[in-house]
């Protein structure tokens, strides 16, 4: 029986729906036939430039047609795509150089505007990669568009098996240095099938993706769309949540994905809350827990909308999902593990815990990935042997509890638990309560060193537009609504919270800020 590979999604959709619109990007529409042809040409162009089976291709682009063509062109040529965020500030350049040394790419695709920085970063590698530039030509690199569109357009022969790597996706770095997660074709297939089944995706869907394709959550919007023969509406990185409003209506979007920040911002826009989107069937929220206040605002604005609250990690794309029919009564739950996925909650000695006990979540599933690229030490910490030979369990580093009915609840990241006055305090419990205070848009709580309490709680608050709330008022609200051990010692009102490139709140930055 023929094995299915990640790039077969596009090939199969092309055979079935050649003239159907597959992608909308920057106002332009591309059919499955056009997209399949471009990716076949890209595979030939990359192979001619030296990419072989198993070689890495670093794609340093923002969401665009070129990024999708490069991703699938790499896969069709037998390679491994590595989508990375690129910025010219010093810390980002240092991190990009680290990615290059770790992955030793055969080729790099980047915007022409970054040519000088890319050339300098690649020049110090033991084996400099072939460079492709988008948006123009350069003496030290190939013009991506010209090279691809003049290449052979015949189908590129499959070379891989499903155990081969499809991509390396770097973790968001929310609590530390990003690590490259090694994801095989079989992991992509299993996760995409799980996601599509839970959302009921079909070829009639129009899926809006404003999440970066450097982020697992964004990457799977692409995979699920092409697997089901749906249409992908791809937006550039979403710096402002209001960017989604225009394509929601114009493209008749049926579903879109966001991180908690997306919805925290969207519910503040009158245009979002008062407009009608008759085709919008569902939204998904992952990449962190949606706070209770914004969830209730979203449901008031769209009472018929199916809201899927989900949990996953780059290391395992879908671990749990709350069916929409339970969301109103349990908005703080992430539901249940999907079929073919098993989870345990364990204590610090590794013993399995019962209902309503907090412990680390451990996952066993087909789509648990291989581990971290070129990082055996970190791999051994999170990917550990299970009960059978070859069985690998993912130790998530996240604290969960499970109620008597089996619903899972995210409590905190292990590293985020605040140890204050001899007790363990979950930041999310504080954030959920404070997010319900009228006039508050977003909240983040962290622990900071304290001589008396071990750690004191420091609360960061972003106000809704036009709200005038003082620190004293927030403190009074906390005294009235939080247990003594959960009350913040310090409160700061900010214009915005620091974020990772994937849109998550960077608690690492908050912990180290003065």
Image (tube, grey):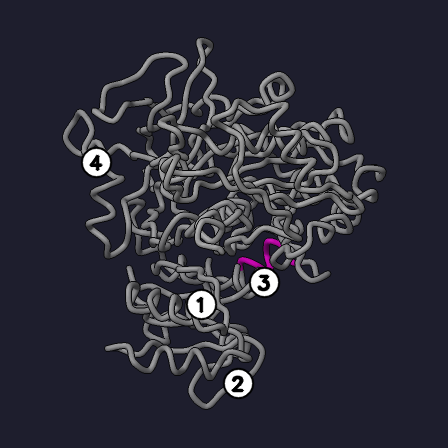
In three-dimensional space, the C-alpha distance between marks 1 and 4, rounded to whole angstroms, equals 31 Å
Which residue is denoted by mark 2 in the rendering? Answer: 137
Q: Earlier in the sequence, mark 1 or mark 4?
A: 1
In terms of secondary structure, where does tag 1 sit?
helix
Label 4 Cα crowd, 10 Å radius (few <14 / some 14-19 / many 20+)? some
Q: Earlier in the sequence, mark 3 or mark 2?
A: 3
Give the mark toward the camera: 4 or 2: 4
Residue at image position (76%, 27%) is: 300
Q: Earlier in the sequence, mark 4 or mark 3?
A: 3
Question: Is disc 3 in contact with disc 2, using a CB cutoff of under 8 Å?
Answer: no
Question: Is disc 4 in contact with disc 3, using a CB cutoff of under 8 Å?
Answer: no
Question: Is disc 3 in contact with disc 1, using a CB cutoff of under 8 Å?
Answer: no
Magenta residues (range): 30-36
Q: Which mark is residue 65?
A: 3
Give the mark toward the camera: 1 or 4: 1
In three-dimensional space, the C-alpha distance between marks 4 and 2, rounded to whole angstroms, equals 47 Å
Which residue is denoted by mark 1 in the rendering? Answer: 92
In three-dimensional space, the C-alpha distance between marks 3 and 2, rounded to whole angstroms, equals 18 Å
Front one among 512 and 401: 512
- 204 left or right, relative to 169: right
Give the mark toward the camera: 3 or 1: 1
Which residue is denoted by mark 4 in the rendering? Answer: 384
């Amino acid at each position: 029986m023929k094995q299915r590979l990640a790039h077969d999604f596009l090939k199969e959709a092309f055979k079935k729906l050649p003239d159907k619109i597959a992608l909308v990007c920057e106002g332009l529409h591309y059919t499955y036939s056009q997209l399949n042809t471009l990716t076949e040409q890209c595979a030939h162009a990359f192979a001619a430039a030296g990419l072989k089976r198993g070689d890495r291709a670093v794609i340093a682009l923002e969401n665009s047609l070129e990024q999708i063509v490069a991703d699938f062109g790499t896969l069709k040529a037998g390679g491994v795509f590595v989508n990375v965020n690129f910025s010219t500030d010093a810390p980002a350049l240092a991190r990009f150089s680290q990615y290059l040394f770790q992955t030793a790419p055969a080729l790099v695709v980047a915007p022409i505007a970054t040519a000088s920085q890319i050339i300098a970063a690649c020049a110090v590698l033991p084996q400099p990669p072939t460079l492709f530039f988008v948006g123009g030509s350069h003496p030290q690199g190939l013009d991506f568009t010209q090279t691809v569109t003049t290449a052979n357009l015949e189908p590129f022969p499959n070379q891989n098996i499903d155990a081969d790597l499809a991509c390396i996706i770097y973790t968001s770095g929310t609590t530390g240095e990003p690590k490259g997660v090694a994801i095989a074709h079989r992991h992509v297939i299993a996760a995409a099938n799980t996601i599509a089944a839970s959302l009921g995706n079909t070829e009639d869907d129009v899926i809006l993706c404003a999440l970066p394709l450097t982020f697992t959550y964004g990457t799977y919007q692409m995979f699920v769309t092409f697997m089901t023969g749906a249409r992908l509406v791809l937006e550039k990185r979403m710096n402002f949540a209001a960017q989604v409003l225009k394509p929601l209506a114009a493209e008749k979007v049926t579903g879109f994905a966001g991180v908690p920040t997306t919805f925290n911002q969207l519910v503040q826009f009158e245009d979002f809350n008062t407009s009608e989107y008759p085709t919008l069937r569902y939204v998904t929220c992952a990449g962190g827990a949606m706070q209770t206040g914004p969830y209730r605002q979203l449901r008031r604005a769209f009472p018929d909308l199916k809201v899927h609250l989900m949990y996953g990690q780059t290391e395992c794309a879908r671990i749990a999902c709350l069916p929409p029919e339970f969301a109103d009564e349990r908005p703080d739950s992430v539901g249940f593990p999907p079929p073919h996925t098993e989870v345990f909650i364990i204590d610090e000695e590794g013993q399995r815990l019962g209902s309503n006990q907090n412990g680390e979540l451990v996952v066993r599933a087909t789509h648990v990935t291989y581990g971290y690229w070129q990082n055996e030490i970190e791999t051994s910490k999170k990917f550990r042997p299970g009960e059978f030979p070859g069985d690998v369990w993912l130790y998530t580093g996240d604290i969960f509890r499970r109620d008597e009915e089996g619903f899972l609840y995210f409590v905190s990241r292990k590293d985020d638990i605040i140890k204050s006055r001899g007790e363990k305090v979950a930041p999310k419990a504080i954030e959920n309560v404070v997010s319900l205070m009228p006039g508050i848009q977003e909240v983040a709580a962290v622990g900071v060193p304290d001589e008396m309490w071990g750690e004191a709680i420091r609360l960061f608050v972003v106000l809704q537009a036009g709200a005038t709330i003082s620190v004293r008022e927030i403190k009074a609200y906390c005294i009235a609504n939080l247990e003594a051990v959960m009350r913040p010692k310090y409160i700061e009102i900010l214009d915005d919270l620091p974020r990772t490139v994937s849109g998550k709140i960077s608690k690492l930055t908050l912990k180290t800020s003065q």
